[in-house]
Image: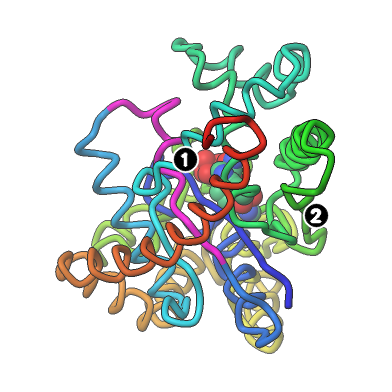
Amino acid sequence: MARILTGIQSSGRPHLGNILGAIIPAIELSKNPKNESFFFIADLHSLTTLKSGTERAEFVRAIAATWLAFGFDHNKNVFWRQSRIQEHAELAWYLNCFTPFPMLANATSFKEKSEKLADVNAGLFTYPVLQAADILLYDANIIPVGKDQKQHLEMTKDIASRFNQLAGKEILVLPEPKIDERIMTIPGIDGQKMSKSYHNYIDIFLLESDLKKVTKKILSDSKGLEEPKDPDNDITFKMYSLLATDDEIAAMRSKYVAGGYGYGHAKQALYEYILEKFAEPRRIFNYYMENTAELESILTSGESKARAIAQHTISKVRDVLGFSS
Ligand code: ADP
Ligand code: TRP
């Protein structure tokens, strides 16, 4: 039995990149009966960059509703908000004292963020330690994440080993990252990596009229309606290919190459495809966004499962540190 654990920060509404690159693959892993999945919303981490409480609460609901919309089985697995389990913050403090300062100072993600952001706070600096606590609290074995998270996972192992060395035994379980190289980077409407921070994302849960507006904004070259077009250098075609079947992709490819088919037609086809393909997730997402009491009760019951496990780990850690006697 492998314990899979992953978290998504509540720093925005989930977009097509998050869904295809993280949420759907993690749910697929969770369907293996040999796996037990621990998926949580990293709302404490989101405080490093997002200060508005109103926005955070909205994004937490949207992320929770997205996991459920794509079929995450919250009864079989464990599903919670990081902030509701105080042991995350408690363990992060203990682990801070096992983390060498240069390890954090040299972290690539910290360096990148501190160049980009105006607010370079201490939370941003110790971000990987809180992430280590998230993982180590639950004895997680496999952590599915994007390539950018590899260094954070190495730090987690390093910090856990330092703690275990003090303890003289394996109190904290060393996890393994699971970086799926097959998962491609989903392009945004401007062709760069789709990201909340680049404002180039497609939110598949938008109202139909707004979704249509976003798809119309996808960048394309200036070829006229009649001209033949190169599907391999077009963002709309790339996005369509990420969603459609092989036959549908081949049919769309022929239309591009033949000419007489404009980018406007392709964007309309993509828009309709998104609506059709995600009709059920859109329905479930809207249901939970409207029935927030039900969403709350799902999370609360997940939190009691998470809390029991977190409390067990923290009591072992407190014993080692002399905080329980
Ligand atoms: P963002 O760049 O929008 O802030 P996050 O860094 O919060 O996204 O990523 C959350 C998860 O979604 C991560 O596992 C990340 O690898 C995945 N992800 C984000 N953007 C993409 C993308 N464009 N293509 C594939 N996966 C992505
Ligand atoms: N840092 C991760 C990201 O930005 C989110 C995260 C927080 C996480 N805690 C985690 C991922 C624990 C995996 C395990 O994508």
Residue 22 in picture, x, y percent from top left: 60, 60
In terms of secondary structure, where does tag 1 sit? helix
What stretch of residues is rendered in magenta? 38-51
Give the mark nearer the N terminus: 1 vs 2.
Answer: 2
In terms of secondary structure, where does tag 2 sit? strand
Q: Is mark 1 within 8 Å of ligand 1?
A: yes
- Circle 2: is it few (<14), some (14-19), or many (20+) Cα within 10 Å? some
Residue placed most toward the observer, 285 or 9 = 9
Compared across the picture, whether 258 is left or right of 219 comes to: right
Q: Quadrant of ligand 2?
A: top right
| Residue type at the position of mark 1 | Lys
Q: Which residue is mark 1?
A: 196
Q: Which residue is mark 2?
A: 176
33 is higher (above) or lower (below) than 26: below
Dots 1 and 2: beta carbons under 8 Å? Answer: no
Color encoding of the figure: rainbow
